[in-house]
Image (spheres, helix red, strand yellow):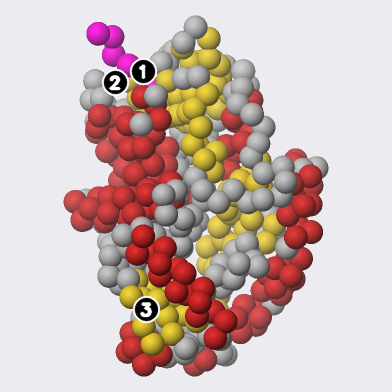
Amino acid sequence: MNKKRYAVIGGGINGLAVARQLLLDFPDATVVLFEKEASVASHQSSHNSGVVHAGLYYEPGGLKARLCRRGGELIGNYCRDNAIPYDECGKVVVALQEEELPRLEAIYRKAQANGVPGVRLIGSNELREIEPNCIGLGALHSPKTAIVSYGQIAARIADEIRERGGRICLNSPVERLLEQGGEVRVELAGGEVFDTVFDQAIACAGLQSDRLAERSGDQDTPRIVPFFGQYYVIDEAFKSHVKGLIYPVPDPRFPFLGVHFTKRIDGQMTIGPNAFISFGRENYDGRSMNLADIFNFASYPGFWKFAARNLPATLRELKTVVSEASFVREAARYVPTLASVGIVPAVRGIRAQAMEANGALVDDFVIRQHGNITHIRNAPSPGATSSLAIAEYIVREVMRR
């Protein structure tokens, strides 16, 4: 039997996980991963909170619920097996107002249906035992929620791919995938066609996933609309005021979660992120604009339908964009002792959020096969948590259909 040949597009944690899984399941296969940057994990995989999500919020039966639970277990095992720091610091989702308590109970029911281990509803007294400086009427406690460095995990997976005989081509942006006669060719930027012909290709292109998919013959929706999220590190003298992760109860009126406290694997404490439209899909410094990216979302009817429905959320988030003091005030609603804490900008992430033409944000993961090409079309949070499970799902289920 001829050896199978696989191309993987994208050197973020999902692309790396897929390439690794192919080599685990098919040790004799030819696996080539293409990454447009000079190093792996240059985008979302190294610009995030580092949280290993337990699976609290996701609709039971959906891909997010299934793959987040499995992925969290795999990430924990991978870190332990490879001596990568992993801190099971726990998380509380805190209700400040009476109207939030029914929503908190609904999250609890989802968490139970998803099999989240150890999750409990707790009162204000027990909340203070877990987070002594946090106020609230009640909370949901998820003791198994953890933190890691996904950039560190990605770097180790890249090493493992090479150790297992895979090839990683850096500085190799892919323009499109061409399928003909059951074989797939990889066309690089500038029109050069890679010399190996592949049996199957898996596109894990993150912020560029919709563009690569459309150029490769897939449909043009959903479209990626980029939202940035800024994190801040609080003054180190105050980092002990929060022990783990403190999150708000999601408000169904708003599409994004809101500012929260997240402990980092290096021991620092962050607040964030906000969520606002990004003027570039890769605008991590916040000081530049990409006119092509701006035109891409500004000319999309779905964006304006989304914006019209979410004006209150836009105004709320805008305050935290223009004012660091507003950012701190939002966080201090949960930990009043930090009302005047000093902060410095930390990582700025950009969420590759898929949006339908009617303005609806795509809630679940979207993984679609088009001939011998598989596209990840939507994998925002908990995409990093789920990465090793997404890889299993693609290699063992999607590609075998």
Depth check: give the residue in front, 345 or 14. 14
| Left or right placement of residue 376 versus residue 218 in this view | left
Earlier-in-chain disc, 1 versus 2: 1
Foreground disc of the pair 3, 1: 3
The answer to whether residue 46 shows anywhere in this view is: no
Q: Nearer the viewer, residue 317 or 239?
A: 317
User: In front: 346, or 12?
Assistant: 12
The C terminus is located in which quarter?
top left
Distance in Å between CA atoms under marks 2 and 3 = 48 Å
Q: Are marks 3 and 1 in contact (CB under 8 Å)?
A: no
Circles 1 and 2: CB atoms closer than 8 Å: yes
Q: Residue at x 33, y 38 (%)?
A: 392
Q: Which residue is mark 1?
A: 5
Q: Earlier in the sequence, mark 3 or mark 1?
A: 1
Residue 13 drawn at (x, y percent): 41, 44
* Picture coordinates of residue 345, whole percent (x, y): 57, 70
- Name the residue that disc number 3 marks: 121
Q: Residue at x 42, y 42 (%)?
A: 14
Amino acid on which disc 2 is placed:
Ala
- What amino acid is found at the position of numbered circle 3 in the picture? Leu
Disc 3 element: strand
Question: Which residue is label 2 attached to?
Answer: 29
**Looking at this view, is 290 or 57 the one in front?**
57
Disc 1 secondary structure class: strand
> Magenta region: which residues?
1-6
Which numbered mark, 2 or 3, is in the foreground of this view? 3
Gap in angstroms between the C-alphas marked 3 and 1: 49 Å
- Judged by its main secondary structure, the magenta piece is loop
